[in-house]
Amino acid sequence: MTTRQLKQALREVLLAGDMDSIVEMFQKDQRVLSGLLGLSYDKTKELTWRAIRTYGFLVARMAETDMETARAQLRRLLWMLTEESGNLGWSTIEMITETICHRPKGMEDLVLLIPQYAEEHPFVESVLYALWRLTECLGRLPWPEDTVREVLSEAGERKEPEVRGYFLLACGKIRHYMEVGPMPEDILKDEREFSYFDGEKMIRTTLKAMAESLCSSEGAKV
């Protein structure tokens, strides 16, 4: 199967949600991971998020029998975040996050590496995604409370709708484990749209609606 044929086959099974076929493809050809990486750049598309989550599932599955090879895959993703790589990994933090969600054991050090990328302009959104998903998957804060506050403080100064959207999603999860607030003062008036993948489909809403929902929930503060 050529690389082009592999990508097309992946598109079809991802959109069909056929995980059994993806696992079978991966067992026969580990280029599936590269194919998923190649489908992970446009975060406005459901296909991209299915590729991201599937990558995490497959690497976590690999870790069950070969942790070192799985960690080598994740180290490659971390390298893609560096300028040295020449190819910024726009979705690599999300892929690492999804791997940890499926297989947290043996990944503790990688969890603690993620917050440092909040200081880099392109990756704040990705770190907030990690905070949202890891809190959800682990059932606790993934980082010390002071670190979480630093990430939220960094993100709170940003105006991009994607950053604000994941900021609100993260706050909605972490409020069960720590006090949340204050949020940006103008966020309750922000009518811009935000889309995210809930594991099954893309959800389209507005930042204002998300903030109002969060503020009406017990324990949330602005």
Image (cartoon, helix red, strand yellow):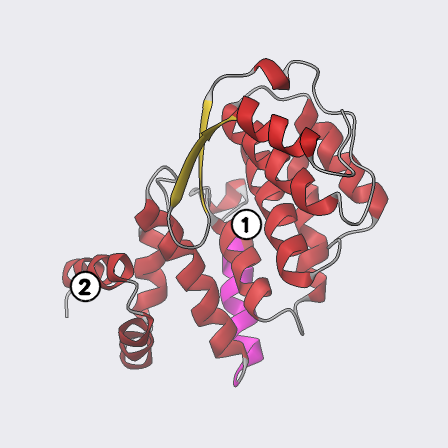
Q: Nearer the viewer, residue 34 or 149?
A: 149
Rounded to the nearest angstrom, the CA distance separating label 1 from label 2 is 25 Å
Q: Nearer the viewer, residue 196 or 42?
A: 196
Label located before the other in sequence (1 or 2): 2
Residue at the far bottom: name it: 65
* Numbered badge on residue 93: 1
Which quarter of the rendering shows the N terminus?
A: bottom left
The spot of residue 153 in percent (x, y) is 75, 29
Answer whether residue 121 is visible to the viewer in this image: no
Task: Indicate whether residue 66 is drawn in magenta.
Answer: yes
Task: Indicate whether residue 217 is drawn in magenta.
Answer: no
> What residue is at 69 percent from the left and 25 percent from the top?
156
Locate residue 149: give its quadrant: top right
Residue receiving disc 2: 9
> What residue is at 34 percent from the left and 61 percent from the top?
34
The spot of residue 70 in percent (x, y) is 52, 72
Tell me: residue 202, above or below residue 67: above
Q: Identify the amino acid type marked 2.
A: Ala
Q: Residues within 10 Å of mark 1 (few under 14, many from 20)?
A: many
Q: Secondary structure at mark 2?
A: helix
> What residue is at 15 percent from the left and 65 percent from the top?
2
Tell me: residue 212, above or below residue 171: above
Q: Decide if residue 179 is on the left or right side of residue 30.
A: right
The spot of residue 4 in percent (x, y) is 16, 58
Q: Identify the amino acid type marked 1.
A: Ile
| Magenta extent | 65-77
Locate residue 205: give its quadrant: top left
